[in-house]
Amino acid sequence: MDYHWDWQFFFQETDDGLKYYEWVVSGLGWTTAVSLASLAVALLLGSVLGVMRTTPKRWLVAVGDTYVDVFRNVPLIVQLFLWFFVVPELVPQQMGIWMKQDLPYFVTAVVGLGLYTAARIAEQVRSGINSLPRGQRFAGLALGFTEWQTYRYVRLPMAYRIVLPALTSEAMNIFKNSAVTYAVGILELYFQYKQIIEKTSQVLEITIVVTLAYFILAFVMNRLLAFVEKRTRVPGLITGTGGK
Amino acid sequence: QLTGTLQKIKESGTITVGHRESSVPFSYLDADQKPVGYAMDLCAKVVDAVKSELKLPNLQVKYQAVTSQNRIPLMQNGTIDLECGSTTNSVARQQQVGFSVSYFITSVRMAVRKDSGVKDIGDLNGKPVATTTGTTSDALIKQNEKGRSIDVRNIYGKDHADSFLMVESGRASAFVMDDILLAGLIANSKNPANFAIVGPSLRDEPYGVMLRKDDAPFKALVDKTLVDLMKSGEAEKLYTKWFMNPIPPRNVNLNFPMSPALKAALETPTDKGVE
Amino acid sequence: MIQIKNVSKWYGSFQVLTDCTTHVAKGEVVVVCGPSGSGKSTLIKCVNALEPFQQGSIVVNGIAIEDPKTNLPRLRSQVGMVFQHFELFPHMTITDNLAIAQIKVLGRSRDEAVNKGLKLLDRVGLKAHAGKFPGQLSGGQQQRVAIARALAMDPICMLFDEPTSALDPEMINEVLDVMVELAREGMTMMCVTHEMGFARKVAHRVIFMDRGAIVEDAAKDDFFGKPRSERAQSFLAKILQH
Amino acid sequence: MIQIKNVSKWYGSFQVLTDCTTHVAKGEVVVVCGPSGSGKSTLIKCVNALEPFQQGSIVVNGIAIEDPKTNLPRLRSQVGMVFQHFELFPHMTITDNLAIAQIKVLGRSRDEAVNKGLKLLDRVGLKAHAGKFPGQLSGGQQQRVAIARALAMDPICMLFDEPTSALDPEMINEVLDVMVELAREGMTMMCVTHEMGFARKVAHRVIFMDRGAIVEDAAKDDFFGKPRSERAQSFLAKILQH
Amino acid sequence: MSDFDFSVITANWRFLAEGLRYTLQVTVTAMTGGIILGTLLALMRLSSIKPLQWFAAGYVNFFRSVPLVQVILAFYLILPLVLQFVTGRMIPIGAENSAYFTFTIFEAAYYSEIMRSGIQSVPRGQIGAGYALGFTYSQTMRLVVLPQAFRNMLPVLLTQTIVLFQDVSLVYAIGATDFFGAADKITQRDLRPVEMYTTVAVVYFIICFVLSRLVKRLQARIAIIR
Ligand SMILES: Nc1ncnc2c1ncn2[C@@H]1O[C@H](COP(=O)(O)OP(=O)(O)OP(=O)(O)O)[C@@H](O)[C@H]1O
Ligand SMILES: Nc1ncnc2c1ncn2[C@@H]1O[C@H](COP(=O)(O)OP(=O)(O)OP(=O)(O)O)[C@@H](O)[C@H]1O
Ligand SMILES: [Mg+2]
Ligand SMILES: [Mg+2]
């Protein structure tokens, strides 16, 4: 293999004055920012949708189901392009111009990734709630809780505990999926990976470094949620095998 | 005794030509998804030369689409034997691959919407400027005398079409790129009259056929073929065919006359790369 | 206290309750029995408005529950209910299980709620377990906590849905003892159960259901003396064999 | 036929079997009983080499199963085994359940295997169900199929691990009847069961286990007449109460 | 920009259809290969031989932690180097072929986790019953355990396959012409992104939606059989 190894290039200066390793670091920063922000959006929206799909109200269920159907059945990359190129042309012109000129790309990317992931989280939250005995809801109602209170105090706390392992892999996934946001101009890790390959052609070195970086991100997330899981474990109860 | 690429071609009985899929009019797919273009025509001549050199009239020609990210690795690892696209011959790239004599000289300029009021670099201060991944427009702008005090916001399209779309849709005030590519994009847009290529040349860049590094016999063959075409006037005919006439797939005419720099390059062919 | 009038209910096209009419007076203990699937749980859930019904009317403490203007959470908070599978909240300590509804529904202060809860916990003999989680208690203990939880709301009547049928034999009595005591204190109770010993001891009336309909509704002594329907006779014979 | 000598087995540091020694002669029916967790299932699984053991020796039909050179699949194919939860293969029809091992292990032709299977299915009274899947049969029917499946391999002896304890009361007898018939025909059988009626009817010897050890090993009449250990006495008292 | 120009779709439908065919080919190949490889990995993971367990666990965890789009690019660039190292010759493989390989390897990690829980969902007694009838390990797995695991997990396997089908769109990153890649290339040349991406989204939606409905019905069927 006449491959020319060169680990030094990480410390070479690029034409924008930064060193290559600084590109990697800045990419890592954007990846983390996009992922965490999207995760927040996804958790919030996904929970709301998941809850909607378990209510007795038919139309709420229909809205939730439709959302999940739409957002799960179109590839993420296509969704990002839609948000970026198509949606601004469909809204009123003033708003379209605002979206194109003033709305940071970061926001578009976070919305795209967040809404996509929300569909998956909604599935999990729903299956978590449905896996609880129906009697739990009745017990809450019988004590005089409103429907919302049974969610707030009785069903959601258990449902989240049950699906935490599944949420953990979703949270790890979001770091990986965030790589696709390079396509809408986010200067995250995969963008820098491509950029560095193009500039230096030192494929192996940069692949090793970037792979490791993604690995660490996912691993940290995993440990973090494992800690949460441990902290919220209910004595005398065996949970931990949530829906897929 | 053959060596390098020629030996590989002889042994395998095939030559693999790397091409781009949307570098109009150098190398792109026509309506039947076949690679065509100015660079493809030039390369066809090179392939003919290889056939007669190796006495392989039945040499099999394979085409392999490449992207700006993978063209260099693919050349290095032997997937392609020559690349006919719109690849700038730069000193940095010469560390990795070889180049033929230049067959085109492009100037880095900018495309703007006519109604945007941007006419020169000076108008860009504080504005978003689109570039395609791999180049940094602010560095180029700053290299220019008039652009020294200018601050722009870089935004990145994943490819030229995306970058151009940013200008078209009003996301970016300008798209800084090789002028010929800008001309191609404008000609293909819905309303070509809305756009203009403006400003001084930020940099001149030569395009060359990409080869493997340190493969003198093959490079000599390629260079000789190209130089012959330039000397015989054949190259200029091909230029007219692709740059001054309607081209497939939609019969758009780029109307892009030969620049003085290119005329000079065809008269005195060179494989010197830019810094 | 509870009036049930001509109640019918369907799941889709399947009729679960057919024209059920009965009542429970203040201080009365009524036992509901019948074969599996006969609609006992459904009927008792209707009383608490946990299940909607399509025809008829149920009035609890003067309030018609089928009236759309009725504040159902408020009504339910006044009616205590105990389930077959206890339905304690597994992620809360026993103390929190007892206190949460008092705080969130009745608006009591946390101190007040906890005090009240602990007092009732003591009454069912489980004071020592206040800090534990439901999963750490036996079934019989959990069911006693569930009764205490319902009592903490100061209910005007109590509904039981087979409170002992998910328990191991040796735990049944510890739960029945609590229920007997409650009945003796004059609590209005409607009880789905197959424990005929309990019925004999404290019930005033026994209702026998079959296929969604109330087949017998008789004073205790009449019921055990000479049940009229053949279905009730054969049911009693089976149950009492145990 | 079966010799068990000083067998001990540990799960980690927990000793499940302690120095067990016994034997089953050809044509003999031996019933194994004892409280839950006493190691009955483990012992019978060791006989079939489904569980490894760390000390002692088991010889089946002259072959030492702890010998690493023993061809275990071959040995197991000669010993029929029936499990508490039937363990029919749910994705195959009854016919395929009966035929598959004959074909894949004994190398019989498909026709031969199916014929043999149907004959045995007839014997356990289920010929009409040949084309069904296990999930479509009742528990008692499934267990009878499981016995037929074991018999289809022409076993030299049969092992049963609580074959009736997962069944509803009314199905127990249909399975026991098959087993009694089998015993009367002279099949060598080792049977973990709490059905003392069955033991009384056909067993030659009864083994009582407690905490991994064989506490009693006596002829049937001796066992039911005057069990020696206190543990066995109290166990028998509980069991026979039913 | 209200003047939509859908002629770009009609003029290029053949190219798009070709792309869709390739997408389906990659999906089917990676599904078949991934399930086979994934099953082997799952068996390794559940075996009692420690090194096999470690290998399988490492494999699965590695591929589940790395972005697919990066794996696609990396494999595409590195694979030829590896082949050259092994064989001493330059073996061009091309973007299209590289994708078959990458997706099979990558999806195997996901399928293996599904098959693992499928195998674990088969009651242990079934294995005992298999052995008791005289089956060997491989017969017990082939005849008893895997058919049931596969059946139990069929809906989940199909759901993963829908995800795979969507993920094939990422091969555009190496310039391969799948359905999305074809759309992307036409967009580059003809500059009609709005029309193109809208159409692409609708096509993906219809295919995936129909498939996921089928999965739901299958799930109901299986629930009844069990
Ligand atoms: N959500 C539901 N959807 C459809 N049918 C239902 C539903 N819940 C209950 N049923 C049916 O309604 C009938 C009455 O059910 P119910 O639970 O009230 O019976 P039950 O008398 O309490 O029986 P058990 O002694 O088994 O608790 C049963 O046939 C049951 O199958
Ligand atoms: N795989 C295992 N790992 C650890 N301990 C086990 C395992 N299998 C069984 N045991 C323990 O070994 C002991 C004997 O189990 P075994 O199943 O042989 O009892 P048994 O007499 O058949 O009881 P039962 O009547 O409940 O079937 C029990 O205490 C059990 O908990
Ligand atoms: Mg009930
Ligand atoms: Mg056992």
Image (cartoon, coloured by chain):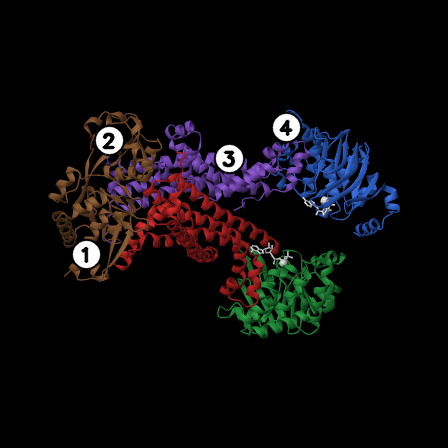
Chain colours: A purple, B brown, C blue, D green, E red
How many numbered marks does the figure carry? 4
Q: In the rendered view, would you say E27 is above or below A176?
A: below
Q: Amino acid at mark 2?
A: Val
| Same chain assignment for discs 4 and 1 | no
**Where is E2 relative to D59, above or below?**
above
Q: Is residue C113 found left or right of C216 in the rendered image?
A: left
Mark 4 element type: helix
Location of residue A185 (image quadrant): top left
Camera-nearest residue between D150 and D227: D150
Q: Amino acid at mark 3?
A: Leu
The picture quadrant for ligand 2 comes to bottom right
Name the residue beneath numbered marker 1. B48
Q: CA distance from mark 4 to mark 1?
A: 87 Å
| Residue C141 in the figure: left or right of residue E190 | right
Dot 3 crowding, Cα within 10 Å, few <14, some 14–19, many 20+: some
Both labels 2 and 4 in a single chain: no
State left or right for residue B178 relative to residue E145.
Answer: left
Residue C125 location (% of width, % of height): 71, 36
* Tag 3 subunit: A
Residue D222 screen position, x and y as percent: 73, 67
The reply to whether callout 2 and callout 4 are in contact (CB within 8 Å) is no
Badge number at residue A45: 3
Instruction: Please give the label number shown on residue B198.
Output: 2
Single out the mark in the foreground, 4 or 1. 1
